[in-house]
Image (cartoon, grey):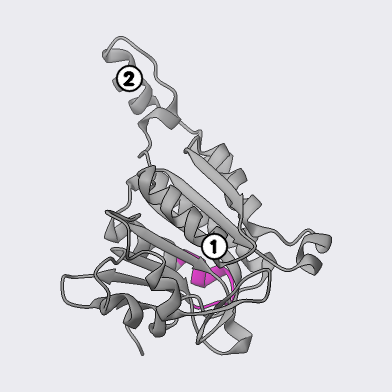
Amino acid sequence: MVCCQTATVSPTEAAQFLAHGTLFLYFDAMKTFKVFVAESVFPEDIRKGDREGQVVQAICGVLHRPITYEVVNNKEALCKAIKTASEGNYNIFHLSCHGDAQGVQLADETELSWDDLAKCFQSLVSIPAALVISSCVGGDHGVSRAFKNSKRRPQVIFGTEGKKKRRITFPGACITWPILYTSLARAGITRNSFKDAVKKMNLITRHRFVYRRWDGEQYRRYPSKE
């Protein structure tokens, strides 16, 4: 369904492209961004095929967006992936792993607090503009608090929050992440793109996705708390 939506060219758009002497592919008119996916899941997840990082890799391939996918089994590998993404000028760092309100858990069962995760970004000259955390409670306010007090911070933090019944699942990830990346591909990495994605993602699943944007002094949450 996503592919059909993004490949549609209206008669007006086709005429505009032809007026310039070249009929470009529709994908070329979409906004360009680079995604680095780091996945750290347990052996049982791999046996079940629950590797949502590969889902993100596939949708970005459909959208013709540059993407790198790596398995990171420990903290050292994760920090190396963050460094590679930063030096490669990636716009989005997507972390797929387990976690809770205190932080994330990697494949080797290492538990990183939100402060520990933020520290992985601090020695770098620049970092990706957006951090997408696909873990249970990956959108917890704790991660924004950790980055608020850090020198290096992403402009956007995107994830889920809430009690157990709202935490992200593999099926939920499969049907929602395509919405986010399609929205960004169509309109760019903008405030409205993230807001639009959050609205749609929260409509079709029981998960509670949130988008946090740095305004120069603090992270502002969308949707605002009820």
Q: Residue furthest top?
A: 21
Instruction: Give the mark nearer the N terminus: 1 vs 2.
Output: 2
> Label 2 belongs to which residue?
17
State the CA–CA distance, disc 1 to disc 2: 47 Å
Q: Residues within 10 Å of mark 1 (few under 14, many from 20)?
A: few
- Looking at the rendered image, the quarter that the C terminus falls into is bottom left
Residue 16 magenta: no
| Front label number (1 vs 2) | 1
196, above or below 224, in the image? above
Give SS at disc 1: helix
Tell me the number on the disc at residue 76. Answer: 1
Image position, residue 18 (x, y; %): 33, 14
Q: Position of residue 22 (x, y in %)?
A: 35, 12
Residue 202 in magenta stretch: yes
Q: For the N terminus, give its image quadrant.
A: top right
The disc labelled 2 sits on which kind of residue? Answer: Phe
Where are the magenta residues, as a range?
200-208
Name the image quarter holding residue 175.
bottom right
Residue located 27% across and 54% down the image: 125
Q: Is residue 4 visible?
A: no
Q: Residue at x 40, y 80 (%)?
A: 115
Q: Position of residue 192 (x, y in %)?
A: 29, 59
Dot 2: element: helix
Q: Is residue 209 visible?
A: yes
Q: As displayed, is residue 161 above or below residue 130?
A: below
Asked if residue 160 lies left or right of residue 212, the reply is right
**Nearest to the observer: residue 132 or residue 82:** 82
